[in-house]
Image: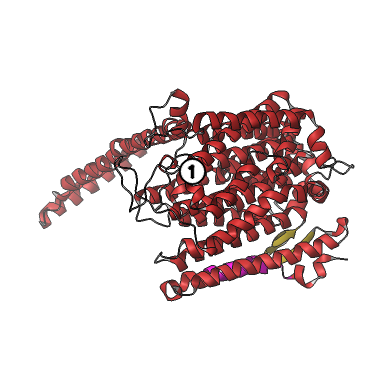
Amino acid sequence: MDLSHTIMFSYAWLLIAIPLAGATILLLLGSAAKKWGHWLGTAVALASFVYGACLFAEMFLAPAEQRATDVPVYTLIDVGTWHVTFGLLIDQLSVLFILLITGVGSLIHIYSIGYMAHDERRSRFFGYLNLFIAAMLLLVTADSYLLMFFGWEGVGLASYLLISFWQERPAAAAAGKKAFVMNRIGDLGVILAMSLLFTTVGSVQYSEVFAAANRIPVATATLIGFFLLLGACGKSAQVPLQAWLLDAMEGPTPVSALIHAATMVTAGVYVITRSGAIFDHAPAAATGVVIVGTVTMLAGAWIGTSKDDIKKALAGSTMSQIGYMMMAAGIGGPAYAYAIFHLLTHGFFKANMFLGAGSVMHGMDDDVNMRRMGGLAKFMRITTVTFAMGYLAIIGFPLFSGFFSKDHIIVAAFGYNPVIGICAMIGALITAYYMTRMMLLTFYGKRRWVEPQEANPNRLPVRHPHESPLTMTIPLIVLALFSIGAGLLMNHWIGQWLHPVTDPAHPHEVTFGEGLIEAFTNPLAWITLVLVAIGIGLGWLVFGRNRDIPLEAPRPNLAEQIGRNDLYGDAINNAAVVHPFLAGTEGVAKADEGIIDGVAVGSAGVIGGLSTQLKRAQTGYVRSYAVTMTAGVIVVGLVLILGQLA
């Protein structure tokens, strides 16, 4: 069966066109769509999900060797031997991203109906969400680096619009600009990679590039790999381009969930995995990916231990978990599939927790400080239980989704390098600690707030926590169910499913062991579980046992201070990039003023002075002109005579 000839695959471009049309309608109509725009935005996201599910079902039933399908869309250039076409590549890798983007994206749209209910610009917000979905779908379904880059830039634009959606807040406006500028640095890496590919291979089509990957000189392939890694660092908030991600929490919480779970931060992992043929041929670049992922995994976990802002603590967690994925993508081979496996499970439990954080904010008058919470489990039962499912998944509690996906990465890390494996285990311990801290500070322990009608001698924050409406809690329940079962559901087949795309060079199909049996017989899995238990215990000792938690954070030790300042990422960027560039700009400005302007002004003065002298010869008297002409004739005559005599 040739899938390219089926109706569903022939019109696969509708996946992108549907949310793009929704965005166009909502943004053009503006306030005219205020009463129904959120319904349209949600409907088009759901329509794309249904279409994607149909594509997946049709692909699943097809033979393995016939699942990858090229869908031609448009011929951009057709001159002589130069042909540039835009088309879609629907294969085992892209279809999983389609389901994640549209599935989780649809739940976030539904959640936003309740969360943004009182926002005057709600229809515009849904238009931006639709644009984000369309751009990300283009990114993961493109059949070339060039078309992928169109989606890559679209994601950057949509993130800027959504992060700075409440632009009347200076912090939100600054956060949007910061994300936009830092991602442009990463974009430069993708542009340079495409330029090298075009000059080396003569094409940026995936099929042609990957077929010729082994013939690219290793030095060139290494450069291409590092340029792609630079792009991935920007989009996926990896060190050293991670500083924008924490500030991005200034946007509405549904935006945070969309960026962290289903769209922007997954783009870098996708590009590295899709470009596996290049990294397999450039081991130095692959090692760079592993190092960046490992450093970011530990850095994000460090930040997560120090933040009192629930959203920023989750943002540090995202950095850390994406670090695991990058680590696996750099290891390569079967670990490509592990990276995607963890990306999918993370999409579920991280969206669950971000939306859960938004539900907490909804019940706590938009307060994000966990030190001002506590005891919310009694008042927000659905939010508490669903958030707890995400918590158990991310720490790798047995049988929850993260238990399967993260443990595969840890085992692969040990096989690659014991030092990397130990770092991965340390990351698991720290994750268990800071996530336990988050659960205890937010939902359990003593209340650090009072109801409006209660006496308040200690001047605690006045709050009236309550459960969120169904439009917000239903997505939480669905995501909680996937946080529980997605790992077990995918553990047995995702390696075989992705093998033709992620590891075509190896003749033997990848396996993920025997599922539950392997998970409880591998010594590394047991060691990891012990470390997770230690992390939970440490979190309980420090923040549990009904401890009195001060409303204001105590004076931090050095480690906490570094974490609270985001590892001084902004200070480093300012010292290494911003200040030198500003100094260089000032130097150029002074050079322009002193030299270039000086030459221009000086030459103008010389010409002006000459003209002043010359104009004195213009007396207006005929006798003066006659004398001048006579003198000129005499001079010319003398020159001619002397020339003859010589």
The correct choice, above or below, for 386 with respect to 410 in the image is below
The correct choice, above or below, for 50 with respect to 235 in the image is below
Residue 92 position within the rendered picture, expressed as x and y whole percent measured from the top left:
77, 54
Relative to 621, is 509 on the left or the right?
right
Residue 345 in view, yes or no = yes
Residue placed most toward the observer, 621 or 265: 265
Residue 76 position within the rendered picture, expressed as x and y whole percent measured from the top left:
66, 64
Task: Point out the image quarter for the C terminus.
Answer: top left
Task: Say which residue label 1 marks.
Answer: 442
User: Hey, what amino acid is under mark 1?
Assistant: Thr
The quarter of the picture where residue 588 lies is top left
Residue 260 in view, yes or no = no
Disc 1 crowd, CA 10 A, few/some/many (<14, 14-19, 20+): many
* Residue 281 falls within the magenta-colored stretch: no
Residue placed most toward the observer, 545 or 643: 545
The residue sitting at 63% across, 35% down in the picture is 293
Count of picture labels: 1
The correct choice, above or below, for 159 with respect to 427 in the image is below
Residue placed most toward the observer, 445 or 582: 445
Magenta range: 11-23
* Residue 13 falls within the magenta-colored stretch: yes
Relative to 73, is 63 on the left or the right?
right
Residue placed most toward the observer, 107 or 453: 453
The correct choice, above or below, for 236 with respect to 528 in the image is below
